[in-house]
Image: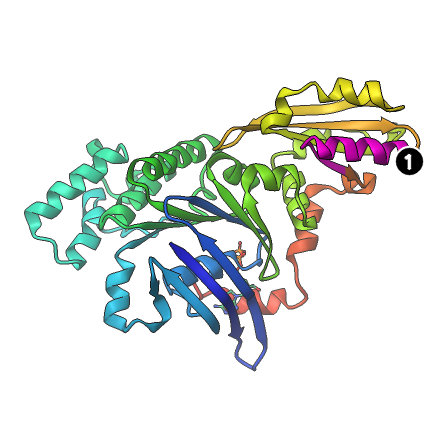
Amino acid sequence: MIRLVDVSKTYTLPGGVRVEALKDINLEIPRGEIFGIIGHSGAGKSTLIRLINLLERPTRGEVWVDGVEMTRLSEEELRRRRMKIGMIFQHFNLLWSRTVFGNVAFPLEIAGWPRAKARERVLELLELVGLAEHRDRYPSQLSGGQKQRVGIARALANAPDVLLSDEATSALDPNTTDAILELLKEINARFGLTIVLITHEMSVIEKVADRVAVLDHGVIQEVGEVAEVFARPRSPVTRALLREGIEGGALAAIDPNALRGPVVRLVFVGESANRPLLSALLRNFDLEVNILQGQVRRLKRGSYGVLYTEWIGREEEIARARDFLEREGVGVEVLDVRELQATPREEVNRLAVSPREPELAAHRSGHR
Ligand SMILES: Nc1ncnc2c1ncn2[C@@H]1O[C@H](COP(=O)(O)OP(=O)(O)OP(=O)(O)O)[C@@H](O)[C@H]1O
């Protein structure tokens, strides 16, 4: 459905400074999937999502949507194609002088729908997003969640095949975020719409995504099924994002000074969650295993259990036990205790700030 082939994007700032926002991106997103792209600030997420509808043009590479190479389209063809790619934004981008009805009608007016048919379609969309009774209100009279519902209705007006979500819940409180994510899941299931969303929050990925790509410094660090990436994160940045996000609370509760052995993160998904593997571990290996923290988390597809344990024993025995659990399908990661001491916020800042950031920030202030 969506295919990026060797895509790179370099911005050139006034004065000739070049910023490589994306490097050799290869990505395939099948029809009907909810695909999440996560990364820290400056990773290249916005650039990547805006390449899909060509709001940004790639410096190199190909962007395919539904069998069409987007960069080869004429302006007129591109305008028509874009109608089939809806987009929602962090700050909603509504027209403040138009009512809810007027905002949702806007793309239909541009597409030249006859008035009566457009009216019918708008009412149907307002019903879908739960705003039928607010049709005559202005955006300033709505809550954040309601504004985003208007954004979603507007994005769906021309019955797109793809919905792009640019941090659509980042400005919302947790309950409203959940309601909007539920709505996105419902739309995906009902219309088979492909949804690509960018976020810096693992909790968003956890709740809605089928698959996820982790982006860092313009490079895809890993991509896979959400459960698989959470169980066996391969890149340091994925581990950092999990620690700062959904697993942060459990980790913060562990006192590193009270530890006698390494902390081992165990993740049970699918089959491995149903077998008594911990008792097998204790029976077969000369180890003392303390459970430090644990939680079961629901994903869009299924759930996963994560246990933080402390292992006390000889190094070879720890290595053998680790092999055993991995063979049984458990995600095993031996944590660096120093990592537990790093406060999430410091970590975010360390990873996000690049040496040229002040210069770029000044330049970027007008780019969106
Ligand atoms: N229009 C632009 N001109 C110059 N540089 C840009 C422009 N847009 C983005 N960049 C730079 O490209 C890199 C990637 O930015 P991008 O906005 O895609 O990242 P992001 O992951 O979406 O970050 P954030 O979450 O902060 O929005 C950054 O270094 C950024 O400063």
What percent of the width, then of the height, locates residue 275?
A: 66, 20
**Label 1: which secondary element:** helix
- Report the predominant secondary structure element of the magenta stretch: helix
- The residue positioned farthest toward the bottom in the image shown: 15
Query: Would you say residue 351 sits in the magenta stretch?
Result: no
The quadrant of the picture occupied by the N terminus is bottom left
The image quarter containing residue 74 is bottom left
What percent of the width, then of the height, locates residue 110?
A: 18, 59
What percent of the width, then of the height, locates residue 298?
A: 53, 28
Q: Is residue 277 above or below residue 84?
A: above
| Dot 1 amino acid type | Glu
Q: Is residue 214 above or below residue 283?
A: below
Residue at 40% in and 60% down:
52
The image quarter containing residue 141 is top left
Q: Mark 1 points at which residue?
A: 315
Residue 143 appears in the rendering: no
- Frontmost residue, 38 versus 146: 38
